[in-house]
Structure formats: structure tokens, C-alpha cells
Amino acid sequence: MQKLSTFDLTPGMVLAEDVLNFDRQTILSKGTELTDVLISRIELNGVLSVYIEEPDIPSKESVHEGYGPAPAKVREDVPPPPPGTHLEFAPSKPTYSERIRDSKEFKDFKRSFDQATESFSFQLNQMVENNAVVNSEEMLSEPLKLIERAGSGSNAFDMIHNMRDYDDLTYAHSMNVALLNYVSASWLDWSEEDKKLAMLCGMLHDIGKLQVSHAILTKPGKLDPIEYKHIQKHPIFGYKSLSDKGLDEHVLNTALMHHERNDGSGYPLQLTGDAIDRFARLTAISDVYEAMTAARVYRGPLCPFRVIEIFEEEGFEKYDPEFILTFLTNVGATYVRNACVLNDGREGEIIMLNKEKLSRPVVQCGYDYVNLMERPDLFIAELL
Ligand SMILES: [Fe+2]
Ligand SMILES: [Fe+2]
């Protein structure tokens, strides 16, 4: 048995242990033989290393433990990927995400993001340590400036999508979820007041994690049942710690219910549908989106169409149908007219989304219109 970085996996290897996602759910079982599709699935779930039954694979130093970001690494030892695999490793020109990250606009955004996150962590600690009442206006002032800077629509989304270089478990994650909530609420045409409230809900949704031991939060690999039960208490810890702070009840409900799922498969109360606060239903989507894309630092964020695909694979019934459809449609729409590369190497332009399968739009390659819905062998490997 050997532990390997996800990037060093190749088809044909056999899993020696179950592979778990960010929520410690099994996504692939021990004994499974890997294929390209399954390797993509492991990557898409943000898993950085797995155990395989494959001796003598010389890449030990590249193994990174756990779910946090891994350091950047050079892959001189690896030949070019065969057709059907990700192309992100060997781009000769800057990728879409590298170009965004290099832009002045993004650098300004990131600087403000750092400031906002710092002041947020200070406010949060004040609140937890001194039992201080939350000043919602003050807490929202920095993130609102960020949104103002980026605009509330697709541009802001693109900035947030590319904001992927934090290993912080709670503060930067919560800030990202807050910004995603604001953008998502804008896409749903919520009132300005509700958009701000959604932002506050995102900022405070995981406050209960401050009461979960750091060792458990950062433990690589499988949690034992007791540890898992403990981590699942963070919504209740959060609800309790927010309950006497003069906050809107939606903020408390979001802390309590953001892991509930529409079909009753969530925790801690197994609520269904409308019994889940609408701000918690909105936050659930931002939270999962954030967590799915979080471990991508070493090669930039995932292609958004890959992220949409994971949501499609997992099934929309876990989420509010209107919220998830609006969110993913707008994520996709952000990149219509964007240049891209297909996995067969052809460059093209995304020209139209397929409503029934948002991860598989129509791409124009020269005079050819490639409807990805009718071509299961093809996918968007990279945005340009
Ligand atoms: Fe949470
Ligand atoms: Fe979260």
C-alpha cells in the first residue's frame, strides 16, 4: 500500500483505502480500479492524496496530507497527459485563471480580501472571547466594499472563483461563502437588504467550527465515528454561540441548518424542503461550491464546468431547486463567449448553454459546432 498524490494517479491503479470527500463521505470504495473518469472525480472532490495498492511509485515527496492546499510542485517526471485527461499541467501560455490572477483588478481585489478577512477574524474572536454583541453593519462594511469593487454579478463571481490560495479553514472560507451568497442572492433578484443579510449569514455560518478541535478539523484521512459526530455538532455550537448576540434569526438558522439537505439527508436535524431556512438553503450551495474548489491552489481553480458537472452527478435534489438552477446557470453564463480548449486539443468558444445539462454547453470550433451534450467523449479541459 502506498500513499500517492492525486496528481500521480494513473488508470489501472487499485485503491487500498476508501476515498472520502471534504465532508468525509465515501466517494470511492477500497478495491476500485481507477479510470480517467474516476481520477477526475477524486480531483473534483478536492482530495489530494489516496492510498493505492501499487508498489514502488517514486513520488513520495509530492504527497501532501489532508484536505488543505498543497505546495506548488514541478512535474518534470511526468509525460504529457494522454487524451481524455486534464490539460492543466503543461500549458505553454498563461491559463485563463493565471491571467485573471495576474490582472491588476484581481490583485486589488485580493488585497482588499486580505484586509476584510483580517478584520473579520478579529471581530469574530472578539465576539467569541469577550461574548461581544455583533455589530452587523461593521462586519459587513469590508466585504461590501469588495463587492462594490468587483460588481455584484459575474465579474465578482469570477474573482471569487479565482480566490483560491488560502489554507485557512474558517475565516477565508467564510468570507468566500459570504461573497458567493451575495452574488447568488443578486442572481435571484433578492432585495438589497436580503443580499446583505445573506452575506452576514455566510460570514457566520461556520462559527461553530471555532469550538471544534483544530486537530479534528485538519486531520488527514478518515475520521473515526466519535470525531465525525463531534464535527457534525458545529451547527449546534454555532447556533448557541450566536443566540444572544442580537442577530437576525436567519443568521442563527443558517448556522444551524447549512448542512441540512432538501431531501432530508443532511444534519443535524434532517430537515427537509421549506423547513430549512431559505438563507441556509442559499448558503448550503455557496458552502459546497467553496469546499469543492478549495484544494486547487497548486494549479489554480477547477474549470467551472467541471464543478457544475459534480453538482449534476450528485443530483440537484439535495438543494433548493430554484436556487441551484439559478446558481449553476449563472456560473455557466459567466463563461459564455469565453474561449476554451476541449480535451481533444481543439480550441473553440463557448457559445450556448444546454439547459438540461449545464456542464455540457455548445462550443464553436472553427466552422464546427460541437454540442457537448451529444459528445460524451469530449469536455472542456480548460478556459482560455
Ligand atoms: Fe459548516
Ligand atoms: Fe462552511
Image (cartoon, rainbow, N blue to C red):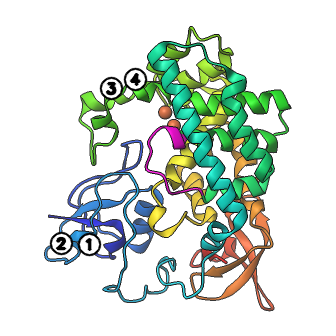
Looking at the rendered image, the disc whose residue lies closer to the viewer, 1 or 3, is 3
The part of the image, by quadrant, that contains residue 378 is: bottom right
Per the rendered image, the range of residues in magenta is: 163-173
Between residues 235 and 207, which one lies in front from this camera angle? 207
Q: Earlier in the sequence, mark 2 or mark 3?
A: 2
* Secondary structure state at the residue bearing disc 4: loop
Residue 31 placed where, x, y %?
A: 23, 61
Task: Check contact, mark 2 vs mark 3: CB within 8 A.
Answer: no
Would residue 321 be seen by someone viewing this image from the given angle? Answer: no
- Kindly identify which residue carries mark 4: 233
Within 10 Å of the Cα at label 1, are there few (<14), some (14-19), or many (20+) other Cα atoms? some
Please tell me whether residue 182 is drawn above or below residue 248 in the rendered image.
Answer: below
Assign the C terminus to one quadrant of the image: bottom right
Q: Label 1, label 3: how many angstroms apart (C-alpha)?
A: 34 Å
Q: Label 2, label 1: how many angstroms apart (C-alpha)?
A: 7 Å
Q: Label 3, label 4: how many angstroms apart (C-alpha)?
A: 5 Å
Q: Which mark is residue 230?
A: 3
Relative to 242, 372 lies left or right: right
Which residue type does callout 4 highlight?
A: Lys
Within 10 Å of the Cα at label 4, are there few (<14), some (14-19), or many (20+) other Cα atoms? some
* Secondary structure state at the residue bearing disc 1: loop
- Kindly identify which residue carries mark 2: 54
Q: Residue at x 55, y 39 (%)?
A: 118
Looking at the rendered image, the disc whose residue lies closer to the viewer, 1 or 4, is 4
* Secondary structure state at the residue bearing disc 3: helix
Residue 175 placed where, x, y %?
A: 59, 40
Q: Earlier in the sequence, mark 1 or mark 3?
A: 1
Task: Tell me, yes or no, whether the highlighted magenta stretch contains residue 227.
Answer: no
Looking at the rendered image, the disc whose residue lies closer to the viewer, 2 or 4, is 4
- Kindly identify which residue carries mark 1: 13
Task: Check contact, mark 3 vs mark 4: CB within 8 A.
Answer: yes
Relative to 24, 204 lies left or right: right
